[in-house]
Image (tube, coloured by chain):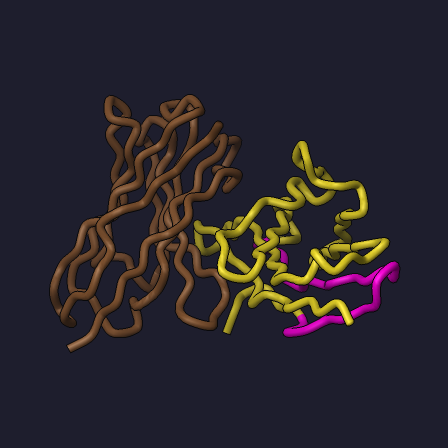
Amino acid sequence: QVQLVESGGGVVQPGRSLRLSCAASGFTFSSNGMHWVRQAPGKGLDWVAVIWHDGSNKYHADSVRGRFTISRDNSKDTVYLQMNSLRIEDTAVYYCAGGYCSGSSCEMVYWGQGTLVTVSS
Amino acid sequence: QSVLTQPPSASGTPGQRVTISCSGSSSNIGSNTVNWYQQLPGTAPKLLIYSNTQRPSGVPDRFSGSKSGTSASLAISGLQSEDEADYSCAAWDDSLNGWVFGGGTKLTVL
């Protein structure tokens, strides 16, 4: 069955960096776009970034553009989120999600269980 | 402040039909399809409805979606206690070049 397993979360000080990973199995990773979506404590879902199945397109939310970078390694069935210059407001559970790409966007069909990132001094 | 607007809460009794609205604009719902996600307490989101009206395999037909113009709705008929969850709508936004979500609606089964 489809599995997405996030890792790399933890407690980090403001201004520092963290890299999240999401390992996929149970579906053809290289044929699917991948997203990162976050959810601050007690808040709604907040889309962060998407990367196309072949890495040809990447988009980031305004709130993270220039600080976060999404990437993928299809040989390892893994998607990454490099997070630099972290802020307190980046504190959230970070989910990876995947799905087919069509036209101008990629779907969010499969979801991982999330990894918690806490930014605190 | 979410780009898509949903009521923060909804409620119903077992067996009832409830609807949850999602309002957007021409750059998101008005020009792209809408997805709905269900998030049970303490768990990850699950795709409930895609392409406005389609249900993934395994989703009961008690759940249905619709879209008109720049608004969409999720309807749940024959409400059950296990439907108590947060429901969020989402759509691609052509102006933002990204997905936008509603703030989520917490459904309570009385």
Residue B47 lies, with reference to residue A93, above or below; the image says above
Depth check: A4 or B70 in front?
A: A4
Task: Tell whether B67 sits left or right of A5.
Answer: right
Q: Residue furthest front?
A: B81
Q: Is residue B56 on the magenta stretch?
A: no
Instruction: Name the residue located 56 percent from the left edge and 47 percent from the top edge.
Output: B46
Residue closest to the far bottom: A121
Relative height, residue B90 to residue B55 (above, below) = below
Query: Measuring 30% from the left and 68% from the top, which residue is drawn there?
Result: A91
Indicate the position of residue A79 as horizontal and vertical percent values: 29, 37
Question: Residue shown at 59%/44% (left/top)?
Answer: B47
Front one among A80 and B2 = A80
Q: Kindly tell me whether residue A66 is visible in this rendering.
A: no
x and y percentages locating residue A8 in the rendered image: 22, 50
Visible in this render: residue B56?
Answer: yes
A78 relative to A95 in the view: left or right: left
Q: Could you tell me residue A43's position as x and y percent?
A: 47, 70
Residue A33, quarter of the rendered image: top left
Please give the name of the residue rendered at 66% of the width and 40% of the height, measured from the top-left corner. Answer: B51
Chain B in the picture: what colour?
yellow
Residue range of the region highlighted in magenta in the rendering: B7-28
Say above or below: A13 vs B36. Answer: below
| In front of the other: B31 or A94 | A94
Determine the image quadrant of residue A48.
Answer: bottom left
Q: Is residue B9 magenta?
A: yes
- Chain coloured brown in this rendering: A
